[in-house]
Amino acid sequence: MTDIHDSIDRRIVKSKQALKDALIQLMKEKEFKEISITDLVRIANLNRGTFYKHYQYKEDILEEILDDVISDLIESYRDPYMHVEVLDISKLTSAAVKVFDHVYKFADFYILIVKSDKLSGFQNRICNVLKDLSLESIAEHGPHTKINPDIQASYIAYAIFGIIIEWINGGLTFSPEYMSEQLLEIVSQNKA
């Protein structure tokens, strides 16, 4: 027997996901400021009451999408570090690198932020998250004595985001596994 709270929670998750998907779909077609609540609920196949039960403004949905993306990005970035005491890049496999799986999972969002000049602030937020994660990694594995950790972290963050941009601009024609392999090749070549 299904718990009543479980089915309510699933309905909430389903409704919120429908609204997020609708917003992304609409943002592909028109400017964010031109999107109305009516547009959102029509595309999501929900009523206005459902929208207002979960959100006050359409900006709240966009913020929640970004929170979801950032949370998943952090988890994906940290994944290779989770199961080892010391990360040895030369022993890292492309399967362990999850950043490109993450981008592929949220491809519609990444395509929007890369292709729209109106959402460049989101690119900066993603890069800042990558920089913070890189700084954590540098701190855990001991900084290089001659390299400023902030500069090194910026280099890593913008290099990864640059590869993501190229992948998106190329139509995501390569698999996430191939992109992970390429990143590992670049990193190992720079270590040599």
Image: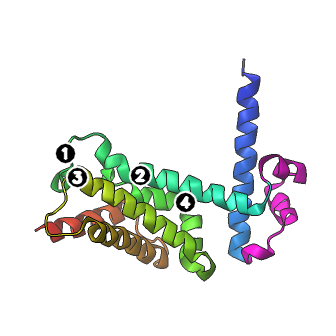
Image height of 70 relative to 165, above or below: above
Corner quadrant of residue 12: top right
- The residue located at (22%, 52%) in the rendering is 92
Q: Which residue is mark 3?
A: 92
What amino acid is labelled 1 in the image?
Answer: Val
| Closer mark to the observer between disc 3 and disc 1 | 1
Callout 4, which amino acid?
Answer: Phe
Disc 3 to disc 1, C-alpha distance? 11 Å
- In the image, residue 171 sits, relative to residue 183, either above or below, namely below
Q: Give the extent of the magenta segment.
A: 30-55
Per the rendering, the mark at residue 76 is 2
Q: Residue at x 49, y 71 (%)?
A: 124
Alpha-carbon span between mark 1 and mark 2: 18 Å
Q: Could you tell me which secondary element the residue under label 1 belongs to?
A: loop
Distance between mark 4 and mark 2 Cα atoms = 12 Å
> Residue under circle 4?
106
Mark 2 vs mark 3: give the one in front.
2
Q: Amino acid at mark 2?
A: Ser
Check the picture and name the quadrant holding the C terminus. Answer: bottom left
Give the main secondary structure of the magenta stretch.
helix
The correct choice, above or below, for 12 with respect to 28 in the image is: above
Of badges 4 and 2, nearer the viewer stands 2
x 70%, y 66%: residue: 25
Nearer to us of marks 1 and 4 is 1
The residue carrying mark 1 is 86
The image position of residue 116, as x and y in percent, is 60, 79
Judge whether residue 53 is colored magenta.
yes
